Amino acid sequence: MEMPAIAGLSWQICFTNSHLNHKSVDLKYHSAQLVFNQKNRP
């Protein structure tokens, strides 16, 4: 009887982890873009 709750929780953890991964990738991309823009400023 406990299985659906555990399955839902593990799905939530998996979803949160992937969401956090996307956020950190976005941050890395944006910071790299900022550095790139500063280096290429005329």
Image (cartoon, grey):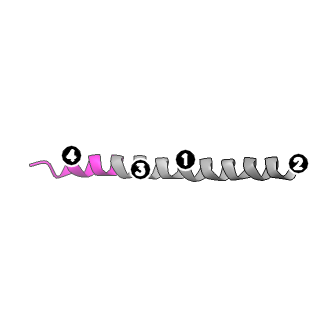
Question: Which residue is the site of mark 3?
Answer: 26
Considering the numbered disc 2 on the image, is that residue within a helix, a strand or a loop?
loop
| Badge 1 or badge 4: first in the primary sequence | 1
Which amino acid, by three-letter code, is at mark 3?
Answer: Asp
Q: Is residue 20 left or right of residue 36?
A: right
Q: CA distance from mark 2 to mark 1?
A: 27 Å
Instruction: Identify the residue shown where x is 54% and y is 47%.
Output: 20
Question: Which residue is the site of mark 4?
Answer: 38
Which amino acid, by three-letter code, is at mark 1?
Answer: Leu
Q: CA distance from mark 4 to mark 2?
A: 55 Å
Q: CA distance from mark 4 to mark 3?
A: 18 Å
Question: Which residue is the site of mark 1?
Answer: 20
Q: Disc 4, disc 2: CB below 8 Å?
A: no
In the image, residue 36 lies at what x, y percent?
A: 25, 52
Considering the numbered disc 3 on the image, is that residue within a helix, a strand or a loop?
helix
Of tags 1 and 4, the one toward the viewer is 1
Of tags 2 and 1, the one toward the viewer is 2
Considering the numbered disc 4 on the image, is that residue within a helix, a strand or a loop?
helix
Bin the neighbour count of mark 4 within 10 Å (Cα to Cα): few under 14, some 14-19, many 20 and up. few
Span of residues in magenta: 31-42
Instruction: Identify the residue shown where x is 81% and y is 51%.
Output: 4
| Badge 2 or badge 3: first in the primary sequence | 2
Which amino acid, by three-letter code, is at mark 2?
Answer: Glu
In the image, residue 11 lies at what x, y percent?
A: 69, 53
Q: Which circle marks residue 2 in the picture?
A: 2
